[in-house]
Image (cartoon, rainbow, N blue to C red):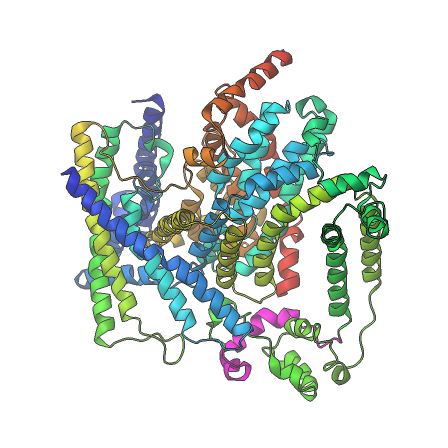
Amino acid sequence: MKKEAWFGLSIMALVVVGLFWAMPPLSQITTGHLGLLMLALIVVAIMLGFPTAFTLMGLGTMFTWFAYHSTNPSTAVQQTLDLMVQRAYWVMNNDVLISVPLFVFMGYLVERANLIERLFKSLHLATARIPGSLAVATIITCAIFATASGIIGAVVTLMGLLAFPAMLRAGYNVRVAAGAITAGGTLGILIPPSVLLILYGAVAGVSVMQLYAGAFFPGLMLAGLYVGYVIIYAKIKPSIAPPLSAEDQFVPLPKFAEVIVKTGRNNVMAGLIGALKGKRNADVPMRKLLSNLTIALLPLLMAALLMGSIYHALTVPKVVDTSGLQEMGAVSTTDIAAPVAGGLQEPPAEGGLQEPPAEGGLQEPPAEGAQETQVAASAAPESPQILAEVAAPDGAAAVAPASGERRPVPTGFWIALGICITGLAVFYAIFTFVRLEIFKMLLSSFFPLAFLILGVLGSILMGLATPTEAAAMGSFGALFLAVAYGRFNWTMLKEAVFLTAKTSAMVCWLFVGSGIFAAAFALLGGQEIINTWVQTLNLSPLQFMLLAQVIIFLLGWPLEWTEIIVIFMPIFIPLLAHFSIDPLFFGLLVALNLQTAFLSPPVAMAAFYLKGVSPPHVTLNQIFLGMMPFMAIQVLAIFLLYMFPAIGLWLPSVVYGR
Amino acid sequence: MQKLLLTVDKISTFVGKTFAWLIVSLTFLITYEVFSRYALDAPHDWAFDGMIQMYGMLFMMAGAYTLSKNGHVRGDVLYGFFPPRLQAGLDLTLYFVFFLPGVVALCWAGYIYAGESWAILEHSGITADGPPVYQFKTIIPIAGAFLLLQGIVEVIRCIGCLKEGKWPSRQQDVEEVDVEKLKAQMHVKDEDIAKLDEFVTAKKGSDK
């Protein structure tokens, strides 16, 4: 047997011995101590490598029976069985966990649609001028792809096959290359839509929508920090990431573009418009010119659309700013208001943001005034934001007479508009034909995925869809993408379906097991012992937070994140109220923290996936060393999030008025 | 014996894969429901129960399938370092200590639970006049039974491994990270990867 195994076994033996040593003498043992014993046993049992779901189920069943038996032996068996089946049914009937298979399915579809190659290529051409461009492109590709697919192993392996050779060939330092891939690949854990946050939401009873809103900016910040680090490092020390050779940067131009460029017009707008009227380009087909002009004008159109809708939203007559009431109000009135709003079939527990846009308020302007008071007083189901959205495309004419004039536009809008116009002007000034080609490539790889992610997130955050519905539509969108890219075939669909079933069964059976286990733990009173013990420690909230994060980080070594969330979070969550820590905020820190576990040697999974596809002379140590700076950045990110909670809590507070 | 084991594997796999297709219908059902609500203004009150039941059946019935493919998450810190015989010994013990009592209890409890539901022909209470749930609750004992069957097969596998010193073979199945497949997808061959070594070693030389 290997040394490592003996080492592990001896540590486990030490834990067990220490446990019995720490237990009070038999006479003073309470059931609460049994609960703690059970907790220690579960850690040991999990380390033994038996499937965790069944370890939890078995231990939970036994200890539940024991707990009931100690109070009333005659009904113990019956009560145990009831409890078990209720926990199982709770998982089956869970309206939060239902989004797990859907998001997983979406992930597998995106992964198998094989967009990554195109994505990486277009991104690396787009970033060619930035120092460390390949590494930057790698991180961005990883972030987008990992976010959409959420499958870390596959992302790291794919990037190991795709970006690693490219970086090595370009003369990149092995460590930087390895670090960029592993760090980027694990971003999918944090950036929503991530399965980790769904599980946390289900365990902690925090709304998944708020978690998604909260994790969005920390995720972006982390990706941004990674990119910033690579750029600065490459700038200071160009030898680790030499700029690309002109040959690698070369983008072949289509024929018509070459013709136009030859006339001396390198700028797209000038060139295309000139070619439209000019006679010199008679050999260039008109349709091609027009279609390219349309593509070139897309950014302008998008910006105009965006600023226009913002203008509308801002100047729409103000109803009553009750964003604070939106979520609560919707939840509390979903039942009562059901007949009014016309067919709300979702249960209130879903968050209640999914009511169909209220027709009533818009069709009858007189009702508007009444509604204002209603909103203010009793939180009517029609939330102002939804109202505003409906009103905007309708021209707001119907609403305007009833509730006053358009509001003046805040100065901030004009500043934003100015920046936008300047940005567009600069963009078009440097928009050459080469860049048009790159833009076209991005259009076919980067934007569809970005739209998919933003569409899923946006519909959740705006309250148009529940996470479940957004996940289903995301899967549908992924299916559509696969068809659009010609990657859709029977095998691919079959594989995605079967993998989804296996992954969902793994996660959800873990919940069945942990449900029984947690019930046993609560029955035995283990939680109370922990609560009183933590309270006697007289920790400040900061100390508690640090302690909790360190424990979770340490648990991240031997255990998978699913196990940590499902087994250990229920122990931490009840303690949060005592220290008045927001469970939402705690969840964000935990998500960041668990991501670090993927990068912390010696068990960092990302490193092993990369090692599996890297050339033999790249050692695990090199990969680990490469991950280190990125791990430091993650710790910095946790620190930043702790110091400035607004990074995570701003968006939920704006959207849900927490 | 091996043939019997593989037959049970096939049964579990077949059941799991059949129910796995529910994810596709779930996707379409929800997408259609959203479309119907926003575009046609015609939400259906059975949709929520329908979604939940599809999801519940999907993962419960895939439990045995996942077990047959060794897909349930394990604490892999030490397990991977153990020789096969120790792995099998530990698994065998723990199947008897944890798995069998837990799953038998679940089956039994589920049987009673579903029986009670059938007795009153229970309907969902989420909406007025909800769809029936007794067939949904019946899934618990059925899924438990399949899991138990697969568990017994796994026990026999453990014994086989204890005798032979190596794990008996399993059926091939699609894997989450199938390196060979991914290599083919990226058009990368092993030689290409090996060739990259010159960059790695050249780099080291220049560093010195």
Could you tell me residue A145's position as x and y percent? Answer: 55, 44
- Magenta region's main secondary structure? helix
Observer-nearest of A289 and A193 = A289
- Considering every residue shown, the one lying at the far left of the view is B1
Could you tell me residue A529's position as x and y percent? Answer: 39, 51
- B192 displayed left or right of A143: left
Could you tell me residue A655's position as x and y percent? Answer: 64, 63
Identified at 23% across, 47% down, the residue is B10
Picture layout, residue A588 above or below residue A9: below
Could you tell me residue A242's position as x and y percent? Answer: 69, 24
- B175 displayed left or right of A229: left
Identified at 71% across, 72% down, the residue is A392
Identified at 39% across, 65% down, the residue is B52
- Can you see residue A235? yes
- Can you see residue A658? no
Residue A334 magenta-highlighted? yes
- B45 displayed left or right of B133: right
Q: Quadrant of residue A51?
A: top left
Residue B22 magenta-highlighted? no
Q: Quadrant of the C terminus of chain B?
A: top right
- Considering every residue shown, the one lying at the far bottom of the view is A366
The range drawn in magenta is: A317-343
Observer-nearest of B119 and B177 = B177
- B110 displayed left or right of A332: left
